[in-house]
Amino acid sequence: MLSTKLTDSLPQVSQSHTVSTDSVCLMDSGGGTPTLSDNPHTTPRNSSNKSNTLTVATWNIKTLLDSQHKSTANIPRRTAVIARELQRYRIDIASLQETHLKNSGKLEETNAGYTYLWSGCEDDKPNYHGVAICVRTELMKKGIVSTPYCYSDRMMSVQIHNGNTETTFIACYAPTLNSDPHTIESFYQELNSVLAKIPKKSGLILAGDFNARVGRRQNSMEDAIGPHGIGTRNENGLRLLNVCIQQNLRITNTCFQQKTKYKTTWQHPRTKQWHQIDHIITRARDAPNVLRCKSMRGAQCETDHHLVRATFKLQLRRYHHAPKPTRRTYDTKKLKTEAIQIQYQSEIDANIHTDNVQGVEPTWTNFKEATIKAASDILGTKKYKKADWFDESDSLIEEALKKKREAHNNYIAAPSSTMKKKYISARKKCQKEVRRIKEKWWTQKTDELQAMMNTNDSFNLYRSIKEVIGPTKKALNIIEDSQGIALKDKNQQLSRWKEHFDNLLNQDTHIELDQLEIIMNSNITTSTIQLPNDDPPSEMEIAKALSQLKNNKSPGQDLITTELLKGGQTTTIKCLHTLLNK
């Protein structure tokens, strides 16, 4: 019979007959076939239960940087390509290794709906490593995933808010077996220290490339390994196993019965043997909440590691969306066309009734409503979309990637030298096609920039230049105490803000009494001061004041921009003159 200890610590399946402990098989409900969708906008199966699960992954992607060499096999804009793959496999949060990015920061891929949070080395050090956490942007905006905490260029973490508790998600990249022994020991000491500080009541998900082969379970004391481990154990595997035993953790990759090709994650370049070195680990008590864990061989980003995906039964914190008032932005560029400008003025004239309105407030309300209605009917809402060569060429790039993906799937389904050559050929064609699309887009964009330069449209020129550089890399909003130590607790962060503003605003003031007495005793005669004219402004003065207003500035609560006031010309001037004379 299956022992109570084993059934409490492993995912359960229905059993219709009695089996021995050695023959326990936990079948992956995925059935060995990657569950993915070619259409990223399709609704997943069992969408009603989607809020009760969290899909995590770990993937050594080799780099997030775009290569500058034309001979490279990588497709330009790796952040977008990798985000598309995560979207295809419906990943909620992923641990990425070997990002090669320096410092820390975040980057959002808007079209794919993912945000990268990374931790790297300092500017004066070589960026050989680097880790990142890629999260669905929706989870970041809802506050389900917190701001990351960066430990080093090999380790970082975020907090996942699930119900009344929290789950710590740690992304890490362990040194290889050939690394300096001091580097290896330092990494595992830091990992042990980080794990020890996490409250026992909190959940834990540890995902990364550990370069560790844990092998099969050798005795009953090795509860950290499930019944379906593979291969032999190396020194790094022993180190990882010791950490898991000390912290009472379970390696989920070894808990499911499936074909070996769905367990291994990396092929040795010399021996051509496949090994399991990328792992997703959780607390032993939470192991029954792991619904499935397997290597997804179809994920492609020109790396020699497979993506490892695991689904956790996790009740995420419910988010009640509070409707926010949206400010409409009108397409004021149309006012440069004379016909539209005349139509806009006529619409204001038709809707305004200043002669029949008494009082300042009703007059202003009538003018505001007439202007807003004219802008809405004639100009319409401005549709702002950041210029991005990858997102704007979405359909063309997706078609090129689909052909490469089909060739890759054919190769892994029937490995042979012929299929490998076809895959390499498809990969080269895909790379050339994406580069051609990129160059064509840039040619069109440079023509637009040149047209703006010829018309002296400096505002839109500089704005477009900033947009075409791609997704903006932003710094992480990490709050530190006075000693420079990052604060993770919300109450500590609020106390730090209070301390900061107390020091900033409550400063001692020094008043020079001698200078103040001189100013008070100075004799200033009113005859030398020219008093301003308090008469209401004329139409000419109003026109001059409007012409001096700067364009492209944010409006007030009335939503009337400078362009809308200038576009009304004589109609607006007369309305304002009538208003100011009341």
Image (spheres, rainbow, N blue to C red):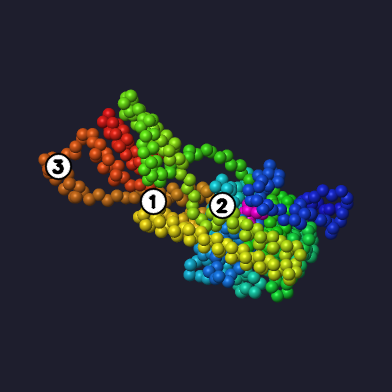
Residue 213 seen by the camera: no
Mark before the other along the chain sequence, 3 or 2 = 2
Residue that label 2 marks: 111
Q: Residue at x 71, y 68 (%)?
A: 420
Residue that label 1 marks: 503
Horizontal placement of 350 versus 175: left or right? left
In the rendered picture of this protein, how many numbered marks are placed on residues? 3
**Which range is magenta?**
85-94
Foreground residue among 63 and 95: 63
Horizontal placement of 572 versus 73: left or right? left
Q: Residue at x 31, y 45 (%)?
A: 549
User: Marks 3 and 2, Cα distance to the nearest angstrom?
Assistant: 62 Å
Horizontal placement of 148 versus 527: left or right? right
What is the three-letter code of the residue carrying label 3?
Answer: Ile
Local packing at callout 2 (Cα closer than 10 Å; few below 14, some 14-19, many 20+) is some
Horizontal placement of 370 versus 526: left or right? right
Q: Which mark is residue 179?
A: none
In which image quadrant can residue 429 be found? bottom right
Q: Position of residue 152 (x, y in %)?
A: 55, 63
Q: Is residue 124 magenta?
A: no
Q: Which mark is residue 529?
A: 3
Q: Position of residue 487 (x, y in %)?
A: 51, 54
SS state under label 1: helix
Given this view, does label 3 or label 2 mark the residue nearer the observer?
2
Q: Residue at x 58, y 70 (%)?
A: 72
Q: Position of residue 300 (x, y in %)?
A: 65, 61
- Image quadrant occupied by the C terminus: top left
